[in-house]
């Protein structure tokens, strides 16, 4: 009888210790900048890129990422611009950030290279060096800009819609 009571106490103490360690570990992971995992969705939560960068997407041999609605994601995209050949920004009146921009990039021979929708004010694209035309549409308003991707370095294109 006494042995069973001692075993129950030991088991209860072990369970209590395990729960305490589990909760403490979860709190540590939240408090530190632990990132990682992977996801098939297009959000930044739990993606393999880490650091708040949204999920990288692929279309053929072109990689791209878009977003920047939240502060963490916006900072991550701004910091990553130097590693992407083309960075684009989409703003409206008062420098308001815009999202849901339909983007189409064509090469010098008018061949489609990328057709996507930017999920926020920033879109970063990995393109081969060359000349491209970017078509951006916000609501019913279209803009077109010519960009040249250098062999070394980056190109930027800023789109502004004066919608009032």
Image (cartoon, grey):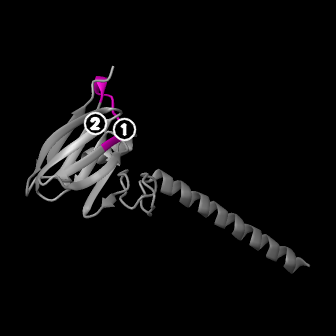
Which quadrant of the view contains residue 55?
bottom left
Residue most extreme to the top: 164
At x 7% / y 58%, what residue is drawn?
A: 151
Total numbered badges shown on the rendered structure: 2
Which quadrant of the view contains residue 12?
bottom right
User: Where residue 146 appears, x then y in whole percent?
Assistant: 13, 43
Is residue 123 rendered to the left or right of residue 156? Answer: right
Which quadrant of the view contains residue 9?
bottom right
Q: CA distance from mark 2 to mark 1?
A: 8 Å
Upstream in sequence: badge 2 or badge 1: 2
Q: Is residue 93 magenta?
A: yes
Is residue 160 rendered to the left or right of residue 37? Answer: left
* Magenta span: 92-102
At x 19% / y 51%, what residue is drawn?
A: 106
User: Where residue 86 appears, x then y in whole percent?
Assistant: 19, 49
- Toward the viewer: 159 or 35? 159
Is residue 46 rendered to the left or right of residue 114? Answer: right
Q: Residues within 10 Å of mark 1 (few under 14, many from 20)?
A: many
Is residue 5 rendered to the left or right of residue 32? Answer: right
Pick the quarter of the image with the C terminus.
top left
The residue carrying mark 1 is: 99
The answer to the question of whether label 2 and label 1 lie on touching residues, with beta carbons closer than 8 A, is yes
- Toward the viewer: 48 or 97? 97
Pick the quarter of the image with the N terminus.
bottom right
At x 36% / y 33%, what residue is drawn?
A: 139
User: Where residue 117 appears, x then y in whole percent?
Assistant: 35, 46
Q: Secondary structure at mark 2?
A: strand
Residue 90 is tagged as: 2
User: Where residue 33 appears, x then y in whole percent?
Assistant: 41, 54
At x 26% / y 47%, what residue is drawn?
A: 104
- Toward the viewer: 34 or 159? 159
């Amino acid at each position: 009888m006494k042995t069973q009571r001692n075993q129950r106490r030991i088991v209860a103490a072990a369970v209590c210790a395990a729960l305490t360690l589990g909760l403490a570990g979860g709190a540590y992971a939240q408090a530190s900048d632990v990132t990682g995992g992977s996801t098939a969705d297009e959000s930044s939560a739990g993606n393999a890129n880490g650091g708040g960068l949204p999920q990288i997407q692929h279309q053929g041999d072109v990689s791209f990422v878009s977003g920047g609605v939240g502060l963490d994601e916006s900072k991550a995209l701004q910091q990553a611009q130097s590693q992407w050949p083309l960075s684009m920004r989409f703003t409206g009146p008062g420098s308001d950030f815009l999202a849901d921009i339909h983007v189409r990039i064509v090469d010098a021979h008018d061949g489609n290279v990328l057709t996507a929708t930017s999920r926020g004010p920033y879109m970063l694209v990995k393109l081969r060096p060359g000349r491209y035309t970017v078509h951006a549409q916000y609501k019913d308003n279209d803009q077109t800009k010519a960009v040249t991707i250098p062999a070394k370095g980056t190109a930027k294109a800023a789109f502004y819609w004066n919608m009032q």
